[in-house]
Amino acid sequence: MTRKTLILLITIISLMLFAGSACSSPVSAESRDAGSLYIESLRKMDFDSAYDHVCTRCNYISLEEFTDAWDNIIKLLEITGIDITDPEVTSEDGSEYINYRITLKSRLTEDLTTDVRQKLTYYDGTAHVDFSYDSILSGYEKGSYIRRRTLKGTRGEIFALDGTILAENSYSDTVYINVSDSLDIDRTLDRISSLLPDADTGRLKTVYEDALEREYSVITVKAYSKGTMDDDLRQALLSTEGVGIDDSSLTYQRFYPYREVFSHIIGYTGTPSEADLEKYGYDERTSVVGKTGLEASYEPVLHSEDGYSLEFVNSSGAVTHILDRVEPVNGRDVRTTLDIAMQTEAYYSLDKYIADDQTGCVIVMDTKSGDVSAMVSNPGYDSNLFSFPIDSATYESLFGEGTNQPLLNRATQVTLAPGSTIKPFTAAVAMDNNILTMNSVFPYKIEKNKWLPDDTDWIWPPISRSKATPGVLNMYSAIRSSDNIYFGWAAMMIGKEKFMDYFENTLHFVDEMDFDLPVKRGNLVNKTTEFNKKLLSDMGFGVGEMLIAPIQLISYYTCFENGCDAIKPRIVKSITSSDGLTETVEQEFGREVAYSGLMSEYTRSKIYDALIEVVKTGTAHDIYDSRRSVAAKTGTAVVSTKREISWIVAFYTGRMDESRIVLVMIDGPADEGDIKFNIADLLLKK
């Protein structure tokens, strides 16, 4: 193509682009040519060619400055294309202008559109575009840069029944150094080194010098979990030149004011793993996720979403233009049924009586509503430990050999042999199938507290009991005195089919339990076990291979106060949100039946009377108080010659205004489980 042909083609294109303006206001051919070539170069993102048509005699800008201005925008906003519409050259008051609408297509935000008006200046035989930064994007100026500022969402908080906060968004005690030209940093770092031996003063000096150059105001030295810094250390640090301690802005901390007292219920948060991000569908910007307890179970409720503000900032740091803004979404709050006084009493009662070689748990709940007012597992841990990296000594105390697994919630995540606490339910199967009555007498001879079934296929040792049951051995006295021989015999009378059907389909013993925290499934018979009479007999008094979580067991016992229905335990009462002024209840949770119709009303009433007698004259007499009406059942499951699981489940009867049920489980050396009575008595009195 000849040069003459090319000039003719450009002229034709110019006339087509600017035909409208030619009709309304006469403009020069040079202006049309310059305008069309400049616009076509921008559309192609060919900024070197576009610069050929920029006026360098107006507001001088070099080729490098011009291309950098465009490249900066393209890189920071991830521009994929430039669209220019409505081009028009106009002539006003003796000057010519090019007018158009430019749209930048960005991967980070919606299309960014700017209406542009640029003066055309004529020299060297052609028109030139008077460039300005805001012709790229409204608000853009020389020296501007773009920043993406995170707008932090606030994680929801967790509250006790009375509104006391149990998990809050707070800040740790952070040691910092003020950045100043006048500070003798070497002297300050020497002092810090003597007070904080683990401080890396070499790194701190490098960070400080960089901060001084960048004109930052402070650098952080070390963060302490809220409330753990020694007072003497605090004073020594504050007396050091340039050093301060912040507790309100520098280092975020999910803080648990009651530390060990609520740890197994509330749990803790931490940095999300790849599995966490995948599980919840979060992106890599998520910095905190619930790891255990309610923090994990209600993670989708508590979770907040960060927003962002995409901003133009000038050389002095002022925001000149907001390109895009996504508001943060705050998490919602979790309101619980937990009672501060009851939880505290349960924690310290268990901690007072339990020995180093014992573990245990306590559950206190309302028999009518299922509201859990206290749940404690021992040993415990401080949830705040996980706010910062854990040192080796702390790690060993939590996970080392012989620590008794303090992070394990023994109320929900441990299954244990229920022992004699299962006997009322063995009785229910026998009575509702018309196999035995409350007055059915054991018909065989017992010698030295042992009974050997006379079945020809019984090949195992005799069934034994700890001591003789006073008087006639019938079902009533067997419940009162917790007689293993009677209930071993009762299970064999019931038979495998009816016994297993009741425990599997009425009690839902091995089904997953619906609760606010994960509950380990119960077990009746191991998959590899060949069922036999000995196993059936053992199950009749809660041993063999039978295992259950304490929270599931306490739920069964609520049936005696709820017309044979077992009530679902609950910790979460409601989900709320707040705009800072008004609190809105988004969801409320009420009373629910977990398992319906565990027995007939007649059977319930008979077993109920026997459970009251357990307290008056039976195995739970240690908690008897003539001023209150309490029913209970105790249990002991011998795990080995040196270890046993000791239980008590006790509840106020309908004859009292109080509707409270208490479970205490102690796991430890044989014959040391009687502390359960002290703990249960305290919690019934509370």
Image (spheres, rainbow, N blue to C red):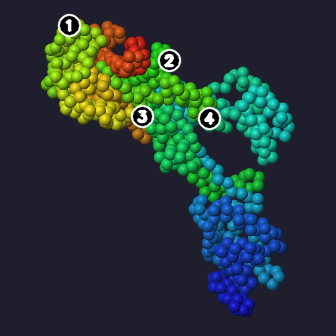
**Identity, as a three-letter code, of the amino acid under mark 4:** Pro
> Dividing the image into 4 quarters, which one contains the C terminus?
top left
Q: Quadrant of residue 517?
A: top left
- Disc 1: which residue: 471
* Mark number displayed over residue 389: 4
- Disc 3: which residue: 517
First in sequence: mark 1 vs mark 4? 4
Query: Which label sits in the foreground, 3 or 4?
Result: 4
* Mark 2 → mark 1, Cα distance in angstroms: 39 Å
First in sequence: mark 4 vs mark 2? 2
Q: Quadrant of residue 666?
A: top left
First in sequence: mark 3 vs mark 2? 2
* Residue 309, above or below 564: below
Identity of the residue drawn at 43% across and 23% down:
361
Rate crowding at label 3 as few (under 14), some (14 to 19) or many (20 or more) other CA atoms within 10 Å. Answer: many
Query: Which label sits in the foreground, 1 or 3?
Result: 1
* Mark number displayed over residue 356: 2
* Mark 1 → mark 3, Cα distance in angstroms: 45 Å
First in sequence: mark 2 vs mark 1? 2
Q: In the rendering, at what x and y percent does residue 380 appear? A: 50, 25
**Identity, as a three-letter code, of the amino acid under mark 1:** Gly
First in sequence: mark 3 vs mark 4? 4
Identity of the residue drawn at 32% across and 33% down:
526
* Mark 3 → mark 2, Cα distance in angstroms: 27 Å
* Mark 1 → mark 4, Cα distance in angstroms: 63 Å
Tag 2 secondary structure = loop
Tag 4 secondary structure = loop
Q: Nearer the viewer, residue 476 or 315?
A: 476
Tag 1 secondary structure = loop
